[in-house]
């Protein structure tokens, strides 16, 4: 609190996750077209072959006057499952690669401590609190 919105925003940017996220979004966008192609051009025809050339997408059930496009729905569910599976596999591989290259990050030593008397933040080397003037270790 008291840092203000701009300070908080700077901290958010400086954390570096934002850059990772931005890269992820851009790559994800490019990756999406690969997955779509994989589903439509590779897995789709294979699935068609397995199911004996049945084209789900035109399968419909008529209930009274309503045409329930069950086939299109099944197709969408299958596509979703395939895309989830592919993304899961890629993320798994990505995390494994990341683990191999990641170096352990050393935590920065603290530069401040909390005054035991007034609970204010003071410099780590201070022997007297600038807020309440108490002597501290
Ligand atoms: Zn103090």
Image (tube, rainbow, N blue to C red):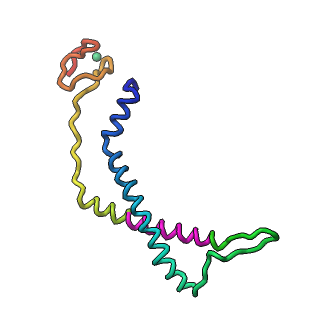
State the residue at coordinates (31%, 44%): 16
Q: Quadrant of ligand 1?
A: top left
Q: How many marks?
A: 0
Q: Is residue 131 left or right of residue 34?
A: left
| x and y percentages locating residue 76 in the rendered image | 58, 68
| x and y percentages locating residue 84 in the rendered image | 48, 65
Q: Is residue 131 above or below residue 88?
A: above
| x and y percentages locating residue 106 in the rendered image | 21, 45
Q: Is residue 69 magenta?
A: no
State the residue at coordinates (45%, 71%): 37
**Quarter containing the N terminus:** top left
State the residue at coordinates (17%, 24%): 125
Asked where in the image residue 112 lies, by quadrant, the reply is top left
Magenta range is 73-90
**Quarter containing the C terminus:** top left
Asked where in the image residue 93 lies, by quadrant, the reply is bottom left
- In the foreground, 103 or 71: 71
Q: Is residue 118 above or below residue 64?
A: above
């Amino acid at each position: 609190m008291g840092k203000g919105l701009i300070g908080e925003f700077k901290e958010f940017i400086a954390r570096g996750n934002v850059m990772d996220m931005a890269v992820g979004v851009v790559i994800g966008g490019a990756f999406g077209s690969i997955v779509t192609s994989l589903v439509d051009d590779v897995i789709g025809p294979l699935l068609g072959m397995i199911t004996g050339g049945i084209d789900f997408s035109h399968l419909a059930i008529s209930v009274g006057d309503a045409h329930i496009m069950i086939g299109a729905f099944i197709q969408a569910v299958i596509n979703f499952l395939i895309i989830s599976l592919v993304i899961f596999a890629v993320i798994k591989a990505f995390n494994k690669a990341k683990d191999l290259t990641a170096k352990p990050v050393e935590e920065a030593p603290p530069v401040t401590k909390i005054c035991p008397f007034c609970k204010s933040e003071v410099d780590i080397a201070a022997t007297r609190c600038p807020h309440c003037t108490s002597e501290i270790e």
